[in-house]
Amino acid sequence: MSTRVFAEEPGITTDGLPVERELPDRVGVIVLGGGLAGAAAMLAAAEEGQYAVLLEKLPVLGGSTIRSAGLSAFVGTDEQREQGIEDSEELLREDLLRVGLYRNDPELVDAYVEHQAVTYRWLKDHGVAYGHIHAASGQSVPRSHPSDTTAMLRSLFTAAGALGARIITDAPVERLVVEEGRVIGVVVDRDGQRHTIRCDAVVVATGGFARDRELLDRVAPQMEHALLAGGPGNSGDGMVMAQALGAGVRDLPWIKGTYGIYAESHPDEDGTGILAVYKGAIMVDVHGHRFVDESRPYKELGDASLARENGWTWQVFDSRAMALGSDEVPIYDFANRLSAGMLEVADTIEELAVRLGTDPGVLEATVAEYNARLVSGDPDPLGREHLVGAVGRPTPIDAPPFYAQRSGTVVLATYCGLTVDPRMRVLDVYGEPIERLYAAGEVVGGLHGAGYMTGTSIGKSAIFGRLAGRYAAHEESELEW
């Protein structure tokens, strides 16, 4: 299957940002990649007094960050307190480990938990605003903080520019430069002309390889029928450059896709999809049968959907679930899907079944059995007890009109990659740091393990990006914090 390119390839233009065209000969810290991890690293390094330069290979900024739903997993926040949500760092840590099937690197989990509160406050101090919190995949309590990712990135880029940091676009890096075991620069290949920029440290924040079908087929053949999206520059080049220096990688076997993408070509599909299952929908296959506990993390739902005939399924729900949608959170923006024509609509389940083309009588029986068990209190044969994670209770699908979206699975991010320590130093295959090479964001492996909790991709990019920038700004001998 070829890479699917959605109708619109979003990117942040450089208007008003601290952008230069000319390639310098020497800087303090070089940051590779213009998503949230790169923006956070650039700003953090600049705040530590370094001359930081961010190199982005594309003409626009944003990476996978602006393709995401913009949800960050933080605990103990102003927004949680305002909504009366009780949460804790201990519960956050346990959720991360549990969803990751305890295959995570516990030191990276600890780093996320330890630094999440200060990073949240740091972002808010730089003007980042968060909206109404929702429960989401893998969370014991609601902790998904929605934000405008474009506004967030512009705030961080602008703040870094005020401290002297600079951005250079159209600057694809070909390789890292090493002298006596220490990373001392990068080689930029621009229009066939190679230019070496020397530096004191490099932060790799180039994202994953969700757009590289060949690499995905090699390491994740289970994604054969998945659609590919993510940042248009996410081809794995940062990971490969670090591997050329002996860097280790981890979590590649756990690459998963995101369920809920519209499974046909449509001009209004932006790549985020919807998760009506977390508001009460059920998932059925092309025949009309349920096959999975819909409260499971959406990466697991993606695996389950890909394993069904044709690799796509239906999300079926009623007006009760429709009313729980929110245009503030893309994955819950059901109303705009309806107006765009991406939802099938019917006054009865029987009529909906005809529209979906399921086997005669099967969808009707599936919904009737599901509703009857909810009314009687009998256990669900697939194990569903909640709407999402451990939050909410399912309700019968009996309030017309009824809706369905044909839903596939998309690889938006790969959630695996370079081995790092809690200081974000890239480690070689023997577990030793590659001197003055750091990494952050999606290119890093180890945090998620075998599963993914909603909000930890954006959260990780900000938290680990900030850490990488701070550590890259100092020699090891200088570090006291």
Image: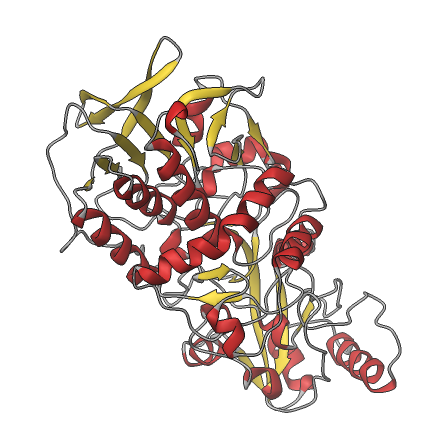
- Residue 246 left/right relative to 170: right
Q: Taking 446 as reference, is 386 above or below it?
A: below
- The residue sitting at 72% across, 78% down in the picture is 393
Which corner quadrant holds the C terminus?
Answer: top left
Q: Taking 184 as reference, is 254 above or below it?
A: below
Q: Quadrant of residue 197?
A: top left
- Residue 322 left/right relative to 395: left
Q: Position of residue 471 (x, y in %)?
A: 39, 34
- The residue sitting at 61% across, 36% down in the picture is 251
- Residue 66 left/right relative to 113: left
- Which is nearer the eye, 307 or 69? 69
- Which is nearer the eye, 54 or 319? 54
Q: Position of residue 325 (x, y in %)?
A: 52, 80
- The residue sitting at 70% across, 84% down in the picture is 397
Residue 6 in sight in this render: no
Residue 162 in sight in this render: yes
